[in-house]
Amino acid sequence: YIDASNFTSGISVNSGNNNDSLLGGSGNDFLDGGTGIDKIIGTTSLAMGIGEKDTLTGSGWDYFVLGDSTNVYYNSNTQVADVTDLDYAVIIGFGSSSNMQLKTLDAAHAGNGYVIGGALYGAIGTSNYYLYTDGDNSGVANAGDNLIAAIDSSIALTTANLKSNYGFFVG
């Protein structure tokens, strides 16, 4: 277990080939779980990712935490023109054995209050999917929806399979 939650500036951690839990602080962190079964948390429940751009890298059976039972992380609800003004997580290495932990926003919604869509505010690295809160409850990503994570995924992600296969919802 690597706990860097007391750090207020960005950190960089590569945990190697073990089964690890990585917890970042309130800065822009780079957390790499390496191989193994990893739980990767880029921020703390107190900081909630506000103002942060964290990079979370996995490989295999990884569990990316983007919220808890009380909070949606990286959810500043700030209207912005492009990605330079946003807070978000970048997830690298998301695959068929990966999951994202998210706070349930609307259990009746197709994605529990989230949508998978394209790059509404500009492309981020090699990300091919983007996770947003569905602010207007339309079921599709629209301008004004808040970016939570940019995801570089080896599998096709949809709002429907987020709820059924790749999202673990709490709260």
Image: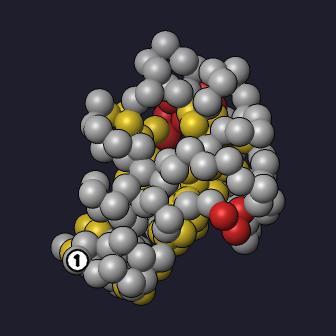
As drawn, the residue found furthest toward the front would be: 79
Res 127 seen here: yes
- Give the mark count: 1
Q: Amino acid at mark 1?
A: Asn
In this rendered view, identify the residue nearer to me: 18 or 112: 112
Residue 143 lies, in percent from the top left, at 77, 39
Up the image or down, 27 lies above or below 161; here it is: below
Q: Which residue is at a point 68% across and 47% down the rendered structure image?
A: 79
Residue 162 lies, in percent from the top left, at 55, 35
Q: Which of the 4 quarters of the picture holds residue 123?
A: bottom right
In this rendered view, identify the residue nearer to me: 71 or 128: 71
Q: Which residue is mark 1?
A: 6
Quarter of the image for the N terminus: give it. Answer: bottom left
Q: Is residue 102 left or right of residue 46?
A: right
Res 61 seen here: no
Q: Which residue is at a point 42% across and 51% down the rendered structure image?
A: 73
As drawn, the residue found furthest toward the top would be: 108
Up the image or down, 142 lies above or below 60; here it is: above
Up the image or down, 33 lies above or below 65; here it is: below
Q: Is residue 49 left or right of residue 126?
A: left
Q: Which of the 4 quarters of the picture holds residue 81?
A: bottom right
Residue 168 lies, in percent from the top left, at 38, 38
Q: Which residue is at a point 34% across and 61% down the rendered structure image?
A: 47
Q: Which residue is at a point 47% across and 76% down the rendered structure image?
A: 28
Residue density around tag 1, few if under 14, some if 14–19, many if 20 or more, within 10 Å: few
Disc 1 is placed on an element classified as: loop
Quarter of the image for the C terminus: give it. Answer: top left
In this rendered view, identify the residue nearer to me: 85 or 66: 85
